[in-house]
Amino acid sequence: MSGAGSAGVVAPQLARFEVPLVLDCGQTLPAWQLVYETYGTLNAARDNAILICHALSGHHHVAGVRADNPKDVGWWDNMVGPGKAVDTRRFFVIGVNNLGGCHGSTGPSSTNPATGRPWGASFPFVTVDDWVRAQAHLADHLGIECFAAVMGGSLGAMQALQWTISFPERVRHALVIAAAPRLSTQNIGFNEVARQAIVTDPDFHGGDFYAHGVIPRRGLRLARMLGHITYLSDDAMHEKFGRELVGGEHRFSLDVDFEIESYLRYQGDKFSERFDANTYLIMTKALDYFDPATRYGAGKLSRALEGARASFLVVSFTSDWRFSPARSREIVKALLDNRLPASYAEVDAPQGHDAFLMEHPDYQRTVAAYLARVAGERA
Amino acid sequence: MSAAVRADLAAIAEWIRPGEHVLDLGCGDGALLAYLQQTRGVRAYGVENDPENVVACVARGVNVLQLDLEAGLSGFDTGSFDRVILSQTLQAVHNTASVLGEMLRVGREGIVSFPNFGYWRNRLQVLGGRMPVSGDLPYAWHNTPNVHLCTLHDFEQLCASMQASVLERRVLTRGTRVEWLPNLFGSLAIYRVTRAR
């Protein structure tokens, strides 16, 4: 956006919690920590905070650049910053890495205090509900009674939705972007292929690869390659790569022929270097398990949202086939059933699921207009 | 707010009771709903397909749902709204009967306003060999969004054919009520309709 700036140099912060966290899976984390970043200033009334929840492979570095690496720009920097849709001159914005993550919050690669070794495969499975409860502890830690808004895209949007169910009195607005109220059978199928790629990699060692000094690179790579196909639309892929050949002609080999192969391999390689395999397994399981309708509404999302008090902005993207607009309309329907204040934008964007990370004038303007109202409410 | 919206605004607001659950189909920039929220305290949603208008609604605090009206209102339960409004939208709709039918299914009652093609000034312009342009029909033939213009008689006939009953009719010319020969002297028509019981 023109005239908008960067959140600047940011440094991650750590919040350590000694209070045991009882997880949905039945296990308890006796002590745990969350890594987070903040942008902007918390006002005196402490009512201008926006929590940003990350998606499958995201983390706490949402905006600005890291002090130790100026090239490391936050994953939602086009959305968050001074003068941007999430305007850090008006809001105090928090990015947090979820439990089970691999960017500094307690997760499978952290040391298990009971054994002195990495948790590895013994790290408990965590759910969206668990994450939201952990984030509420962070809100307590920061002295935030009620968020002006909780927002996220994809799996992040599921957390925003869950916030309105778990803590209705602690969130005034939820921005639910590129979401689904629960995964489709096909979605779970894709996740399972990704998981199988990882767990069948000989370097996985049942999840305890840390001790062997290896990482299941091939598995992570395949998982990410598959993921990328589902994040993009067929049209976007065609537009970007077409049937372009890397070497200008068919090589009649299993080496890279088409540009799309080169792209997927590159993305897979990059990802396998920076992401923890156990975290990937846990995150995909959290996606699969997310189902507020069944858990809180006897199968009906409308019932699950009966206690919600927030106002909503729901956004979907026309070319998203992973979480199609129809899935967002399911959420909108449930909000209307409860006569909750809600707006819904269906952005005509070609990029597929990934559109929620991209710039599109209709998208950023809608979010900006919505949050300008939110900012005005306090004045 | 356009002059056309302003003209039927007060009349529509008169028919809305405080706190009602209202759906405005083709809500444009949300002017009508903002007015109803302020003056009637309605709990309302607008349906709109134009992204510019969606942003405008969001900016003024009107709940807006970006949906294609023509694709149907299957996402809305039968009888889920007290009132469903079609303010100056009907004439721009392609599937007129189906939108009207959906409106009467979703709402306990419908409110429809449209420019009366039978207004004498419009007739005069047609007689003079030109497509009419006026305050309530502000577009030229080549850039008009209006595809299904009608007269009061036409609309009432459609309602009858759909077993919809007209509860009340208000006809205006430049904001003033017209009682005498409304199909000739009325420029804008506003109806309260419901499914026949």
Image: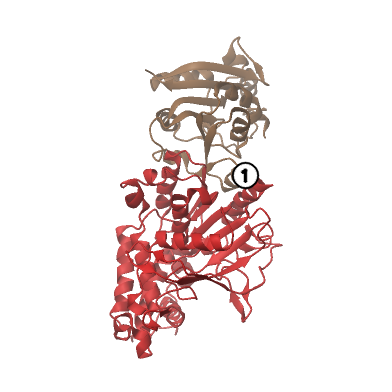
Judge by depth and name the residue closer to the eye, A225 or A374.
A374
- The chain under label 1 reads B
Chain displayed in red: A
A306 sits left or right of A171 in the view: left
Chain displayed in brown: B
For residue A1, say whether it is visible.
Answer: yes
Amino acid type, residue under disc 1 in the picture? Ala
Judge by depth and name the residue closer to the eye, B141 or A74.
A74
The percent coordinates of residue A375 (x first, y second) are: 65, 50
Please give the name of the residue rendered at 37% of the width and 76% of the height, measured from the top-left corner.
A278
Residue lying farthest right? A3
Judge by depth and name the residue closer to the eye, B143 or A152.
A152
B3 sits left or right of A227 in the view: right
**Image quadrant of residue A187?**
bottom left
Q: Is residue A142 above or below residue A116?
A: above
The percent coordinates of residue A185 (x first, y second) are: 29, 59
Q: Is residue B127 above or below residue A321?
A: above
Q: Is residue A169 above or below residue A58?
A: above
Residue lying farthest bottom? A213
Quarter of the image for the N terminus of chain A: give it: bottom right
Q: Which residue is mark 1?
A: B56
Please give the name of the residue rendered at 44% of the width and 61% of the height, measured from the top-left corner.
A155
Please give the name of the residue rendered at 67% of the width and 71% of the height, measured from the top-left corner.
A8
The percent coordinates of residue A200 (x first, y second) are: 28, 80
For label 1, count other residues whose C-alpha is less than 10 Å away and answer few (under 14), some (14-19) or many (20+): many
Q: Secondary structure at mark 1?
A: helix
The percent coordinates of residue B66 (x first, y second) are: 51, 45
**Image quadrant of residue A234?**
bottom left
**Image quadrant of residue A26?**
bottom left
A96 sits left or right of A305 in the view: right
Q: Colour scheme used in the picture?
A: by chain
Q: Is residue B126 above or below residue B31?
A: above
